[in-house]
Image: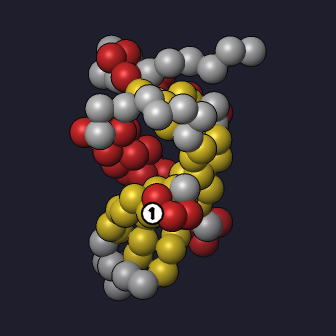
Amino acid sequence: MSDEPEPSYAHVPDRGRYEVRLGDEVAGFAQYRLPDPTHVDVVHTEIDPTHHGRGLASGLVGFALADVRAAGKRIVPSCPYVAAWIRRHPGEYDDLTDWPHD
């Protein structure tokens, strides 16, 4: 059993990102931009390599999508990880996803 704390998630709007934290450590983040008042465009997701394989990125994306939904906004998954995550959950986020144009 690990002594690492359970992950917690936070929206940090002044930094334009969602964070996953292990205790006081920021273990990863999902960076976004706001192209208009309706959309949250997630452009990059990153987890510290020392924490890979723990499902932190998945938990982070789930938290971010729930927050976007609760705010009445729509997600633009420009980040390849976020796009793949949404595709692995068919039908669950169709109501708030606007796919980026190629």
Please give the count of numbered marks on the rendered protein.
1
Choose between 96 and 29: the one closer to the eye.
Answer: 96
Residue at image x 68%, y 15%? 101
Rendered image coloring scheme = secondary structure
Q: Mark 1 points at which residue?
A: 12
Whether 34 is drawn above or below 86: the answer is: below
Specify the quadrant that holds the C terminus. top right
Choose between 90 and 93: the one closer to the eye.
Answer: 93
> Which amino acid is tagged 1?
Val
Residue at far left of view:
70
Image coordinates of residue 23 in percent, x first then y, are: 37, 82
Residue at image x 39%, y 46%? 64
Quick check: can you spot residue 60?
Answer: yes
Q: In which quarter of the image is residue 74?
A: top left
Specify the quadrant that holds the N terminus. bottom left
Image coordinates of residue 19 in percent, x first then y, are: 46, 62
Image coordinates of residue 71 in percent, x first then y, are: 29, 40
Residue at image x 51%, y 64%? 14
Disc 1 secondary structure class? strand
Whether 81 is drawn above or below 13: the answer is: above
Query: How packed is label 1: few (under 14 Cα within 10 Å), some, or many (20 or more)?
Result: few
Choose between 23 and 17: the one closer to the eye.
Answer: 17
Please indicate whether residue 74 sits to the left or right of residue 101 in the image.
left
Residue at far front of view:
37
Quick check: can you spot residue 56?
Answer: no
Residue at far right of view:
102
Image coordinates of residue 75 in percent, x first then y, are: 46, 30
Residue at image x 37%, y 63%? 10
Whether 52 is drawn above or below 23: the answer is: above
